[in-house]
Image (tube, rainbow, N blue to C red):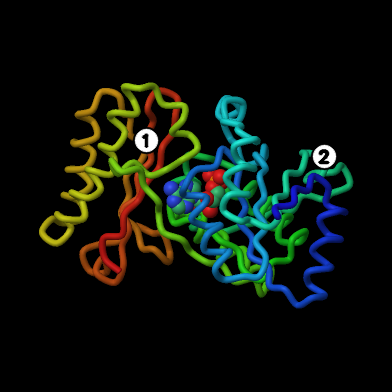
């Protein structure tokens, strides 16, 4: 039976009971408008823990664009139904007041170059907002393991660094990208695409797959130029960045070190809808 909590106190009481029974807790933080990508995280948490907790909270402080926040999809009934069907034990849907009471002192985190590249460059304040909310959830839920998707590649690097910085013992579990049958990475924002945009959007993954195929023969510079050319050909897409970076440092790779690990990351706009995706080139 799935239980839904809106208040920290009640959730804490239930989780304390479970901890007393030595139950392990897996935690999946989300912003709702759930899809199979999110559900894959729950599925993994269910497999690896006695209890799974999923939070649904659209975190205002991680949005650098107010319009994006206002238009962020909300589907609470369907979220609860999907989570219940998957056998998620506990759903936590807090209000803003619960998450950010006036008495709460908001920390300021620093992630060095991890937060100055790619998403960090174009979304000022975003990762600090993510770190603050994730730390707050970690304090509330105190899970053994927490699950994050590789779809948000840079976010995962930030979370791993956060856990190191705060000296937390929570194990961060990386989960693969779940895609639609046509290759488009699942995202809550996909529901905002028009029919024509939705038809064109799988082109992102098509280009990324071609990048992976060409990675053996083209130089990094050639690959970057080729990719920009492909995306610029598509009138409905406006590229924000395309970078080929080390999966550890997130710094751009070069010809000498690219074989030690590299991931191609892309962000683009279709009208005002921002989509991101990535693919591992060398591991
Ligand atoms: P969000 O609700 O967008 O904050 O995402 C919550 C979690 O689900 C994050 O760890 C995301 O990386 C993960 N996630 C979102 N989309 C996907 C996807 N298509 N495949 C795998 N994980 C995903």
Q: Residue 238: which quarter of the image?
A: top left
Q: Residue 267: which quarter of the image?
A: top left
**Coordinates of residue 20 in the picture (x, y in percent):** 82, 75
Number of marks present in the image shown:
2
**Coordinates of residue 123 in the picture (x, y in percent):** 52, 40
Q: Residue 162: which quarter of the image?
A: bottom right
For the point 10% across and 59% down, which residue is it? 217
| In the foreground, 123 or 29 | 29
Q: What's the mark number on residue 268?
A: 1
Q: Is residue 154 above or below residue 98?
A: below
Q: What's the mark number on residue 97?
A: 2
**Coordinates of residue 72 in the picture (x, y in percent):** 57, 31
Horizontal side of 107 relative to 264 (left or right) equals right
User: Distance between the Cα atoms at labels 1 and 2?
Assistant: 33 Å
Secondary structure of the residue carrying numbered label 1: strand
As drawn, the residue found furthest toward the left would be: 217
| In the foreground, 165 or 211 | 211
Horizontal side of 152 relative to 62 (left or right) equals left
Mark 1 or 2: the one toward you: 2
């Amino acid at each position: 039976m799935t239980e839904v909590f809106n208040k920290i106190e009640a959730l804490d009481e239930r989780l304390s009971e479970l901890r007393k029974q030595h139950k392990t807790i897996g935690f999946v933080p989300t912003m709702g408008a759930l899809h199979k990508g999110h559900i894959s995280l729950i599925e993994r948490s269910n497999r690896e823990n006695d209890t799974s907790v999923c939070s649904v909270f659209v975190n205002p402080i991680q949005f650098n664009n107010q319009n994006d926040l206002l238009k962020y999809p909300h589907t609470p009934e369907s979220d609860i139904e999907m989570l219940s069907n998957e056998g998620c034990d506990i759903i936590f849907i807090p209000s803003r007041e619960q998450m950010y009471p006036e008495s709460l002192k908001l920390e300021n985190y620093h992630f060095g170059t991890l937060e100055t590249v790619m998403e960090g460059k174009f979304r000022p304040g975003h990762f600090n907002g993510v770190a603050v909310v994730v730390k707050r959830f970690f304090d509330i839920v105190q899970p053994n393991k927490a699950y994050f998707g590789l779809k948000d590649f840079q976010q995962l690097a930030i979370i791993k660094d956060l856990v190191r910085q705060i000296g937390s013992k929570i194990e961060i579990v990386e989960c693969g990208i779940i895609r639609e049958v046509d290759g488009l990475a699942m995202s809550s924002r996909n529901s905002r695409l028009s029919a024509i945009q939705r038809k064109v959007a799988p082109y992102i993954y098509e280009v990324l797959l071609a990048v992976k195929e060409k990675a053996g023969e083209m130089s990094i510079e050639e690959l970057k130029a080729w990719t920009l050319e492909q995306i610029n050909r598509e009138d409905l897409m406006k590229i924000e960045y395309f970078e080929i970076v080390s999966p550890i440092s997130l710094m751009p790779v070069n010809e000498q070190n690219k074989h030690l690990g590299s991931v191609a990351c892309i962000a683009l706009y279709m009208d005002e809808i921002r989509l991101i995706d990535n693919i591992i080139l060398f591991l």
